[in-house]
Image (cartoon, helix red, strand yellow):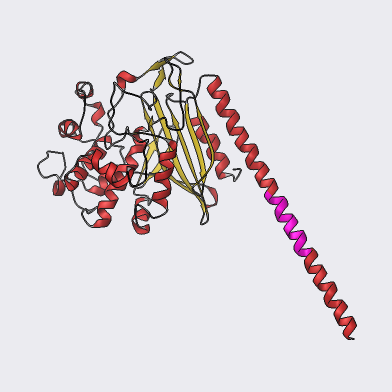
Amino acid sequence: MKRKSFFNKLIKTKKMKITTLKKAKLLALILILLTSLAIAQIKKIDSILITSAKNNNFSGSVLIAKNGQILYKKVLGYSNQEKNVLNNDQTAFSIASVGKIFTATLIMKYVESGQLKLSEPIKAYLPNLSIPNSDKITIHHLLSHTSGLGNYMEHPLIIEKMNQKSIRIDDIIPLIEDQPLVFDEPGQKHQYSNSGYIILGKIIENLAKKSYSEVLYEELLNPLAMNSTKISIDMNNFKGMAIGYRRLIPNGNWESTMNMLPTPLSDGGIFTTAKDILSFDWALFSGVILKDKTLELMTQQHSEGEQPGFGKIAYGYGLMLDTFEEGIKSVGHNGGSPGYNAEYRHYNIDKDTNYTLIILSNHERVIRPIFFDIQEMILNGKI
């Protein structure tokens, strides 16, 4: 009986070992298949980018990260076509309105510290300015593009301002004071507003008693070692930065936009690299910059607007929000200015998995098809 019992146990143990071994082999096979699929998709991305660059349809930087670790990065094209200077990992590109995320983050830091209230009006922080509706428009309205303020870039005197050697936020304020409201009642609807983010920049300056540039460096850029990011631009020394190019006609020659370069301010225009944005992305979503509750407030939907190529877009505070199938969510922003385009997204796949996608280009209006192709791969779990 004892011997029979012993053999039964031995057979059972062997069966368990065989089952465990089969499971291990199956998991290994699945891992190999997933890895092979990811490698195939990476090769596909590589092919798309290389072909686009060879056809002179893409110049810039692409970075994909999973849980903060870089899966893929590629830099192609020229930072200066006329002098045949190639882009590299340290080449900084204008990210245009993606820079609004930095301004919103700084504002939320002040909210978190109790120095600022989202429900307070502009007038509480800038009492001496003559901003329309400054007694009604709150910080919340400015952050969520529901203030009713318009776009100072449409002011007839903006060209004159841009021709100045250096432009400060204070130089833009009179244009905003002079412009009529897009709508009268704050919170009535969403209307994307560069002017609103200039006002936020001025509030930051008043609270800190420093320039917006100084606060940005002290609070974000220096602590996060974003050493390739630049907000002060010397037009006579563009070393390390990519010149922007645009086509005046389809498939025509790429023309420099150096004479159209907007000054980086609190509404965007900062020059940076994909790697620096990844550093910011990691710090923002790992609790280094903001507490979880503050970040949650920043990433909640506060308004909804329309954007060409995307349709309806939900907005948080300085962030575009999207929800896909199976509950996958993304936050980020895009940007465009003469000669430049940028796309930045952070995807929450599940509680343990996130992806970051960053595409920067000094060729105008070329990155959206690339962005959608890579986004689809991320959403379908192919990378």
Q: Quadrant of the N terminus?
A: bottom right
As drawn, is 329 to the left or to the right of 292? Answer: right
Residue at 27% across / 31% down in the picture?
232
Residue at 54% across / 37% down in the picture?
374
Q: In the image, which residues are magenta?
A: 19-31
As drawn, is 145 to the left or to the right of 89? Answer: left
Is 20 inside the magenta-drawn segment?
Answer: yes
**Res 201 → quadrant:** top left
Name the spot of residue 226 as percent of width and height, x first.
37, 41
> From this viewpoint, is residue 33 visible?
yes
In the figure, 232 relative to 1: above or below? above
Is 35 inside the magenta-drawn segment?
Answer: no
**Res 132 → quadrant:** top left
Residue in front for this viewpoint, 177 or 167? 167
As drawn, is 144 to the left or to the right of 329? Answer: left
Residue in front for this viewpoint, 293 or 289? 289
In the figure, 304 relative to 240: above or below? below
User: What count of labels does the image hold?
Assistant: 0
> What type of secondary structure mainly makes up the magenta span?
helix
> From this viewpoint, is residue 144 visible?
no
Residue in front for this viewpoint, 309 or 371? 371
Q: In which quarter of the image is the C terminus?
A: top right
Name the spot of residue 92 as percent of width and height, x first.
39, 31
Name the spot of residue 38 as percent of width and height, x first.
63, 42
Name the spot of residue 77 as percent of width and height, x first.
49, 23
In the picture as drawn, the residue positioned furthest to the left comes out as 128
In the figure, 9 relative to 47: above or below? below
Residue at 44% across / 37% down in the picture?
274
